[in-house]
Image (tube, grey):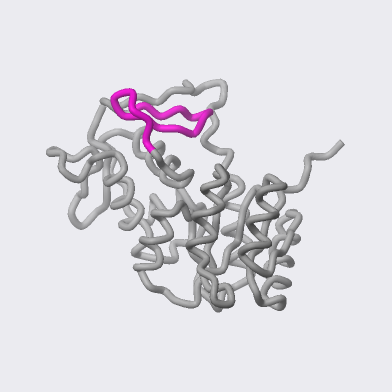
Amino acid sequence: MGMKAPQILIVDDEPELCQIVERCCRVEGCEPVSAFSGEAAIKLCSRSDFDLVVLDIMLGGQDGFEILGRIRGQGHTMPVIFLSARGDETDKIIGLGLGADDFVTKPFSPRELGARIKAHLRRSRAISPDASEERMLRRGPLCLDRLAMSVSKADCPLSLTGTEIKLLAHLMEHPRQVFTRRQLYQSIWGGAFMDDNTIPVYISRLREKIGDNTRSPAIIETVRGIGYRFSLE
């Protein structure tokens, strides 16, 4: 018996766009389910466990940010990709704070969206430890549980999104190693380097959540002109 196809929830009030995204999903071997309103999406999420959500920011007067907050409020941790007609960095900061994992600006390439979906599905499972890795990753006061996808600092749990945990895990696995924005983007998203602002926004959010903004020296250091490194052995 074959493995069950990943289920993707598509939330958009434009049926034509939903059909395009549905085709992207099927090409990647996924099973798409479309919801044409935020309320319909919330009801579907309450009844089913989806592997990924593609969510439009503008939903006929509804706010995709509010819908995302309600989805996360139900306890769902699946990757969420926002579709946005705007490339505003403010949208990214708001979305990341609510638990978004990626942004794709409209109009988009179906091939690019399909690649993003595939990369997030693959990486949502990639952090689980294999036989050669320890489950717990510890650096200084930080402890990352690869299997439970959770992070604590000095035994106090932290509220991080799945993508933030993957980024932190990658940095913690290679202490003192400097990574460029391009390298981090490739490691976490697995696709072509598309947006020069994505990594700084994620690093900023991650620093805020681990209490790194007022610490000196920083846990995640900026190496001017090059990139970032995790400073704790």
The picture places residue 162, in percent across and down from the top left corner, at: 48, 43
Of residues 225 and 5, the one nearer the viewer is 5
Tally of marks: 0
x then y, percent, for residue 223:
20, 49
State the residue in front, 4 or 229: 4
Q: Main secondary structure of the magenta part?
A: strand
Q: Say above or below: 1 vs 98.
A: above
Q: Is residue 108 above or below residue 75?
A: below
Say if residue 123 shows up in the picture. Answer: no
Look at 55% across and 38% down and name the residue there: 126
Q: Which residues are magenta?
A: 143-158
Q: Quadrant of residue 24?
A: bottom right
Residue 8 included in the magenta stretch of the image: no
Q: Hey, which quadrant is residue 26 in on the image?
A: bottom right
Vertical comparison of 65 with 176: above or below: below
Q: Is residue 105 above or below residue 166?
A: below
Q: Is residue 99 visible in the rendered structure shown here? A: yes
Query: Residue lying farthest right?
Result: 1
Give the image location of residue 207, x and y in percent: 27, 45
Quadrant for the N terminus, please: top right
